[in-house]
Image (cartoon, rainbow, N blue to C red):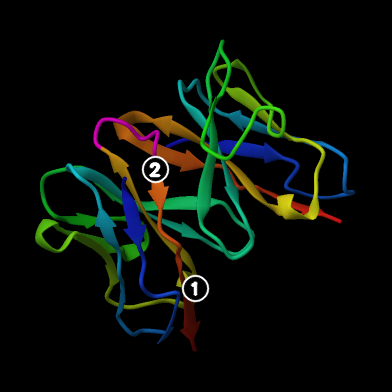
Amino acid sequence: AQSVTQPDIHITVSEGASLELRCNYSYGATPYLFWYVQSPGQGLQLLLKYFSGDTLVQGIKGFEAEFKRSQSSFNLRKPSVHWSDAAEYFCAVGPSGSARQLTFGSGTQLTVLP
Amino acid sequence: SAVISQKPSRDICQRGTSLTIQCQVDSQVTMMFWYRQQPGQSLTLIATANQGSEATYESGFVIDKFPISRPNLTFSTLTVSNMSPEDSSIYLCSVRKVADTQYFGPGTRLTVL
């Protein structure tokens, strides 16, 4: 069965600092990988996705993520965090060829200090 | 992408009652999904809403508790029946668009007293 682990429940960074959110997955084949962001009281917004090809993918709002097959990881990064980035971030994995069975990680809550 | 709306955005309900949540998409989609997000938790898939046939439920979720309708390719409803405080959650619908990507609605925040 597929699974996703986000080891950091809560991360606090200062505005302007760099950010890395960790995501490890377990899946038997080549997965589709996603990062979503959920602002307070909002639904989920897709930040970026990886299906194949270049292992470094660019997303919206200045985010990027790198797929590392050898480490089963898909970490999310941003070089300079803005106060508006404070939100909860979810990593998700799905089997290639179908978005039906998305499995979500437990989420990482990001706090941004002024 | 997709523009998805949900009604109501939030509600407070009494134990034993039922609530129907609506999900509207701005374009026709084949696959629509309903998720539950319990307080402080991640998302759990409830069911896949199939147009023209019964919904497909995930383990732990049953039709009697969460009946789903999908009358056309842009609309679906989820009913939370005979509610208890344990049903207090955010309920989100999502749709699958091109390139196997799911897009989510804003969610319905339900509190059961």
Q: Amino acid at mark 1?
A: Ala
User: Which chain letter goes with mark 1?
Assistant: A
Q: Are marks 2 and 1 in contact (CB under 8 Å)?
A: no
**Picture disc at residue A61:** none
Query: Which residue does the image show at 42% across and 84% down from the upper left?
Result: A15
Indicate the secondary structure of the residue bearing disc 2.
Answer: loop
Which of the 4 image quarters holds residue A41?
Answer: bottom right
Q: Chain of mark 2?
A: A
- Spatial separation of the CA atoms under disc 2 and disc 1: 24 Å
- Residue A86 badge: 1
Task: Give the quadrant of the C terminus of chain B.
Answer: bottom right
What amino acid type should be assigned to the residue bearing mark 2? Leu
User: At which x and y percent is residue A70?
Assistant: 9, 60
Mark closer to the observer (2, 1): 2
Expressed as whole percent of the image width and height from the top left, the position of residue A31 reads 23, 44
Foreground of the two, B100 or B36 = B36
> Residues in magenta?
A96-101
Total numbered labels: 2
Q: Can you identify the residue that label 2 sits on?
A: A102
Q: Is residue A39 left or right of residue A81?
A: right
Indicate yes or no whether the magenta region holds residue A97. Answer: yes
Q: Describe the element under mark 1 as helix, strand or loop.
A: loop
Residue A11 on image: x %, y %: 42, 80
The N terminus of chain B - image quarter: top left
Q: Residues within 10 Å of mark 2 (few under 14, many from 20)?
A: many
- Say whether residue B110 is left or right of residue A48: right
Q: Earlier in the sequence, mark 2 or mark 1?
A: 1
